[in-house]
Image (tube, rainbow, N blue to C red):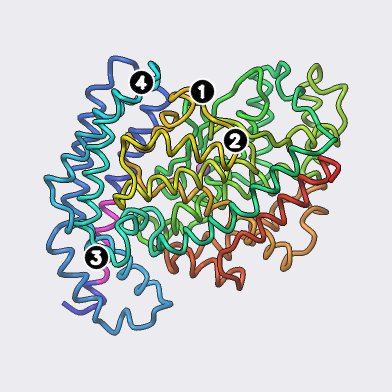
Amino acid sequence: MDDQTRYENLCQRVRETALLQSTSALLEWDQQTNLPSQADDYRCQQLTFLAGEVHRRRTDPELGELLNQLSDSPLTEDPESDQAAVVSNLKREFDKDVRVPAQLVEEITKATSAGHNIWVQARKQNDYASFAPTLSNIVDLMQQKADAVGYEDCRYDALLDEYEPGAKTADVTKVLEALRIELVPLIEKIAGSENRPSSEVLHRNFPVDAQKAFAKYASEQIGFDYARGRLDETHHPFCTEIGPNDCRILTRYDSSFFNSGFFGTLHEAGHGMYEQGLRSDQYGLPTGKYCSLGIHESQSRLWENLVGRSSAFWKFFFPVAQQHFPDALNDQTVDSFCASINTVQPSLIRVEADEATYNLHIIIRFELERDLIDGKLSVEDLPDAWNSKYESSLGITPPSFSDGVLQDVHWSAGLFGYFPTYSLGNLYASQFFASAEKEVGDLGVLFAKGEFSDLKLWLNDHVHRQGQKYSSAQLGKRVTGLDLSHESLIADLQSRLYPVYGL
Ligand code: CO
């Protein structure tokens, strides 16, 4: 067999695995939208079976053999080639997959699926003590997993790598610490301003049918392709890809809060436009797959915040919004409305946080989970550590575990290493947007006319079509010429929020 044949053989195997994975994705989408309540057990059997098949294929020794042969082949010599990107990314994943013993994988699955229900109950009853043993067990299993995968500097690296391949804890710590140092006084300055815009208008009555129509219209206008995707409703919004031309975004509507449906849809449409912008001829291969969760989140945040909260965006959309919601918006101007959607208020709950304080919620979680995994913080001491970080960063102390340390699903699901990607996404979003503006020209002038395709095409070329050719740090550097830093995000927040507060 020559190397070209080996490469085709490799791609064929991986594309077949993608058929199984996309089938699972469809079953999961259906589970979150349409599944009858009694059908859950069998659906879990279906998903577990498919997950087993996927794992078997991903750890097949014949796959490892092919990857070894191709790694040393002239076919993958040019590091910029598709072949090199495909082989090196698959080899990295394969080497990790085979290092984690099957028994540990099974134990993690068991602990996290039981852990979910225990967490739900504990949160409901505000009872941290009933969740602590479960969390201890999950932390212990994640430490074992990190040790099995291996790491150079610290254990957390091994877990972070799953969501942000190639990222190192030390670098993330440095950039997020620099961000925190700038954010805390920025938020204090806003809190101390005399000019206090109200967000009351956002809590008026927004009929759900009108919200659906407006959200669909706006997401289509910015470039989400409904011939290759759908928008549906769910409890926990997300975006999933079921094939090269089938991207599903999900949102939720609240008739007495404008933001959750509208900005939730823009956010998921941003994720969806990334998926739709990947190279469909490479579907299933690393060259047709998103780079990292941080880069994925950069695309959702860019459309949600940098585009969707700008005054230029609302110059175009506000009159349309008034047509959809005449009762709620007729006494508003575009300026008063823009001020309302850009208010900042320290709060307890991450998913309800505004754009500025949101990153502090993330930094707190990142520091805590890093220290849990590295063995520097015990599960017993976690609630106190949580509360003191909230006090020092946001000036508030949670009155209960439910509104504090128990609020997020991630840790009960074993998702350690996931949280920092939210803030990395915000940082990348600002840097990408600044570069786009430099190269495309004044984007606000285009937005005010309802034109978003120049920005979308720029992102298609510079970010989406790169797939996994580069790590997130390499991609950021290639696109922006800069290392990741807090500066662009801080500048964006200042330029948009300070005028709202008369600063
Ligand atoms: Co997101």
**Residue indicated by mark 3:** 10
Q: From the top left corner, tell me how far across and down residue 474 is, in percent.
A: 49, 70
Residue wearing tag 4: 127
Residue on which the image places disc 2? 265
Q: Is residue 196 magenta?
A: no
Residue drawn at 20 percent across, 49 percent down: 55
Image position of 433 (left or right of 176)? right
Badge 2 crowding class, 10 Å Cα cut-off, few under 14, some 14 to 19, many 20 or more, is: many
Q: Amino acid at mark 3?
A: Leu
User: Is there a contact, CB below 8 Å, between mark 3 and mark 2?
Assistant: no
Q: Distance of mark 1 from mark 3, alpha carbons?
A: 55 Å
| For discs 2 and 4, the disc positioned in front in the rendered view | 4
Say if mark 3 contacts mark 4, CB within 8 Å. Answer: no
Q: Which residue appears at 13% of the width and 48% of the height?
A: 102
In this rendering, the label closer to the viewer, 3 or 2: 2
Badge 4 crowding class, 10 Å Cα cut-off, few under 14, some 14 to 19, many 20 or more, is some
Determine contact: label 1, label 3, CB under 8 Å.
Answer: no
- Is residue 382 shown above or below 461? above
Part of the protein shown in magenta:
7-17
Q: Position of residue 117 (x, y in %)?
A: 30, 23
